[in-house]
Image: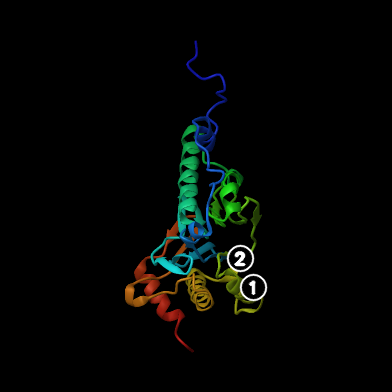
Amino acid sequence: MSDKPENFNGPGDFIDLLERSGYSWPKAIAGLTAIDKASLPQGTTVLAFHFKDGLIVAGDRRATAGNSIMYERCDKVIPIDDFSLMAIAGVPATAFEMARILSHNFEYYRRSQLQPLSTEGKIRALSKLLKDNMGLAMQGVGAVSPIFASFDKKEGKPYLYFYDILGAQFEIQTHTATGSGSPVIRGILEYEDLWGDKKLAQRDLKQAAKLAIRLLQTAGQFDSATGQARPEDKIYPVIASITGEGYQFMPEEELAALFQESTKRK
């Protein structure tokens, strides 16, 4: 006699395993007040775009709750696997939980199926988590608007996706940004891609990183929820790249040098 439960349908993925084990996202919080919402930390602003060798993903470091600055060293660009990053805008607690589940999901699939999850599978996994989180998102207390960046080793090309808070995903061919400071920098990104010295996809890593620093500094000028770099406190944006070699975060020393170069007046 088999010891497997009657509803066992094979290994599936980690999210299926969680659901079979009784895990589920909270659907709503009864009696939530406006004061409660205002006390929840929020994270902004993140951006991503294609550059010559792959994708660059960047974010500021500030987390706010209402008009209060809660934290100035929030990491909004999160590794999911060796070739995938998630950039988050919204409630960090929800976003970090999604990132942990995705990371375990991808690793569970790799070990159980003896092969990595496909890019399409990765994209849909995040979409499902966002859809399951719809109850809290609609209340305004658990909303997450992520960017997902991944390099497909089999196809030898990068993929960049933007999601809305309900889980709809949109493939991005050039650039994207989300968070409260994003309206300002989306226009700059479009201008740089159309009329800059080079198209975004033709720039090398250094050029792309310098642009990302300038964009986040600009967003911070117009949006109080977006933190600017503070060299005196060694606070710089988080900048990472994804290429065929995997993801790589820029070290603080390199960011400091790039910041000095990128903010010099000509």
Tally the numbered discs.
2
Residue 143, given in percent of the width and then of the height, sits at 55, 55
Q: Residue furthest bottom?
A: 266
Residue 91, given in percent of the width and then of the height, sits at 50, 56
x 52%, y 41%: residue: 116
> Would residue 83 be seen by someone viewing this image from the given angle?
no
Query: Looking at the image, do the residues carrying marks 1 and 2 touch, with CB atoms under 8 Å apart?
Result: yes
Nearest to the observer: residue 100 or residue 84: 100
Q: Which residue is mark 2?
A: 175
| Amino acid at circle 2 | His
Helix, strand or loop at disc 1?
Answer: helix
x 55%, y 26%: residue: 10
Instruction: Judge from the rendering whether residue 235 lies leftward or rightward of residue 112; answer left or right.
Output: left
Helix, strand or loop at disc 2?
Answer: strand
Near mark 1 (Cα within 10 A), the count class, few <14, some 14-19 or many ≥20, is: some
Nearest to the observer: residue 50 or residue 164: 164
Residue 190 is labelled as 1
Instruction: Judge from the rendering whether residue 111 lies leftward or rightward of residue 193; answer left or right.
Output: left
| Sequence-first disc among 1 and 2 | 2
Instruction: Judge from the rendering whether residue 225 lies leftward or rightward of residue 190; answer left or right.
Output: left
| Amino acid at circle 1 | Glu
Instruction: Judge from the rendering whether residue 70 lies leftward or rightward of residue 115; answer left or right.
Output: left
Residue 106 is labelled as none
Which of the 4 image quarters holds residue 63? bottom left
Colour scheme employed for the rendering of this structure: rainbow
